[in-house]
Amino acid sequence: MSKKEAVRSVDIISQTEELADKILVNKQELTVMDKRRQHNREALRVIEKSEEPKVWITVGSMLVKMKREQAIQLLKKDQQQIELQINLIYSEQKILVNKHRDVEFKSPFSGTNLKPLDRKEFGALKANLPML
Amino acid sequence: MGETEKIEVRDITRIERIGAHSHIRGLGLDDVLEARAVSQGMVGQKDARRAAGVVVQMVREGKIAGRCILLAGEPSTGKTAIAVGMAQALGTETPFTSMSGSEIYSLEMSKTEALSQALRKSIGVRIKEETEIIEGEVVEIQIERPATGTGQKVGKVTLKTTEMETNYDLGNKIIECFMKEKIQAGDVITIDKASGKVNKLGRSFTRARDYDATGAQTRFVQCPEGELQKRKEVVHTVTLHEIDVINSRTHGFLALFSGDTGEIKQEVRDQINNKVLEWREEGKAEINPGVLFIDEVHMLDIECFSFLNRALESDMAPVVVMATNRGITRIRGTNYRSPHGIPIDLLDRMIIIRTVPYSEKEVKEILKIRCEEEDCIMHPDALTILTRIATDTSLRYAIQLITTANLVCRRRKATEVNTEDVKKVYSLFLDENRSSKILKEYQDDYMFSEINEHEEEVATAGGGGAKRRIDTGDGDAQPMEH
């Protein structure tokens, strides 16, 4: 293998490894985000069920005592943020995976640009074509 | 993230019956679409294979609709083999419908309906389904029934994955789903967030030793990884024909299996076309035109050809590949003769790929591949004799001799087929030439011998007013005229 080809192979390998690394990091991110989401959800349920006017809530690594309504507002806002983040990560993942396949000279996986069908439309199809 | 990667799993232990073209795995082209001499089950026929490779590229790009390709060549030159190779090369994603020309003559539906259905079966529509699901292993379930006996049940379930754990409060409806599926601690389940359906995937491996005996249907799966609430995206391909059938009958999918679709009205088809185009505009669907392969296309009649002329001009038309081995012969349904039995206006719209007869070396390679496929070990001398037989008689006859020689060899308790076996089978089974020669010699001894009657007819023709019987075998047996 000549020098140019060796350099090119190293180039391709480093690109794929970089992209693969980013993809795996994103996967971890998703897990962390989901953990936060679930904890928020549990907290919301507990606060909504309880009657106390003031509740203890963890913000970062501090324990803070707040009014019930404020705590609920805070948690809901946090949930929205997390949802946005997660959607962002999903779209990033799709782009990264396609780029990774592109660098490996594979075609991008089919259906990348499709928007999903409505639940009713897909439900109608699925009801009539049990193989779907 | 989701099941967006397509994983192909092939069952290696599946036993298939060996067919005439089961040894073909693809077209055997390299990256620049040049045909390798022996590759993926295809041998020789380089020009035709390169042309077929170009057609496969054309279909993959998907932007060209309604092209027609004709594979024409002498019998036993690999036309159907190339079509099978194309089907394999396109993969499982592109719809590939294969039919024979005579299949359209059915009592249940008219010829044009059969053709329309075949054309619509070759166009795929890609759609995507997206759901949020919660997938995890059940750690514990707590259900509280009200003491009064009538009232809402409440419950709590704790789910975990390898990296996190959380609990959910359950309402009455979903508790009933849980109880219906008989979910206990240690089961791996998925809950569809939108519809609330609960699905049991199996039992976790870590709980396999809980009981000494489990039911016969117990499946063990791994504990899920990553996040609990995932987004699942699945891409499906349906064909236009399937959508037609759903919309033309109330119990559409039963019709799909029984084949009893009847005639589908054109208005239904137009509505479907509009809907699919609408989805395409909104970005919800992609049209994936595939290939319709019509073998023995000279069996179609003039009405079908006229229909095809028009149908190929619609923008929802697949690529049609046809194959025939007829020369200049009568178009079915008329008395006119035309090349390949296809009217000239349709021939004008086609690109024609020629297949040529194989050389002796190529025949030897093909026989070697078939020997491997049919699990038969052959001595090189036996292979040489078989090649000679193939070039003298026909390739198909030699392929038939392979398995029969194998059986003869096994009967004498040997593993390798040698020349004696081949000679024995050659004498046992006649090929077409020898059979016709024997017929001509002993025609008087056979019942209803045609040649006999024909001579009588010629004798009485001099008397005038004799019926001229259309000899149907004549035009069809002609070899290719250059």
Image: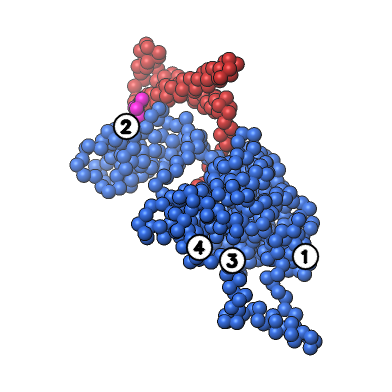
Chain colours: A red, B blue
Task: Let me know if residue A6 is in the magenta part.
Answer: no
Q: Dot 2 falls on which chain?
A: B
Amino acid carrying label 1: it is Arg
Query: Could you say which is closer to the camera, residue B248 or residue B147?
Result: B248
The front one of A77 and A108 is A108
Q: Which of label 2 and label 1 is nearer to you? A: 1
Chain-order first, disc 4 or disc 1:
1
Q: Nearer the viewer, mark 3 or mark 4?
A: 4
- Which chain is mark 3 on? B
Viewer-side label of 3, 2: 3
Marks 3/4: CA–CA distance = 12 Å
**Residue B100 against residue B152 in the figure, above or below:** below
Can residue B267 be seen? yes
Q: In screen coordinates, is B439 left or right of B4?
A: right
Element at badge 3?
helix
The answer to whether residue B277 is visible is: no
Q: Residues within 10 Å of mark 4 (few under 14, many from 20)?
A: some
Q: Could you say which disc has been placed on residue B432 in the image?
A: 3
> Residue B337 shows which numbered tag?
1
Q: Secondary structure at mark 4?
A: helix
In the figure, B477 relative to B372: above or below? below
Q: Residue at x 36, y 59 (%)?
A: B412
Q: Quadrant of residue B89?
A: top right
**Which label was assigned to residue B426?**
4
Chain part drawn in magenta: B160-165
Question: Could you give the CA–CA distance between mark 1 and mark 3, rounded to whole angstroms?
Answer: 27 Å
Mark 3 Cα within 10 Å, few/some/many (few <14, many 20+)? few
Residue type, label 2? Thr
From mark 4 to mark 1, how far is it between C-alphas?
A: 38 Å
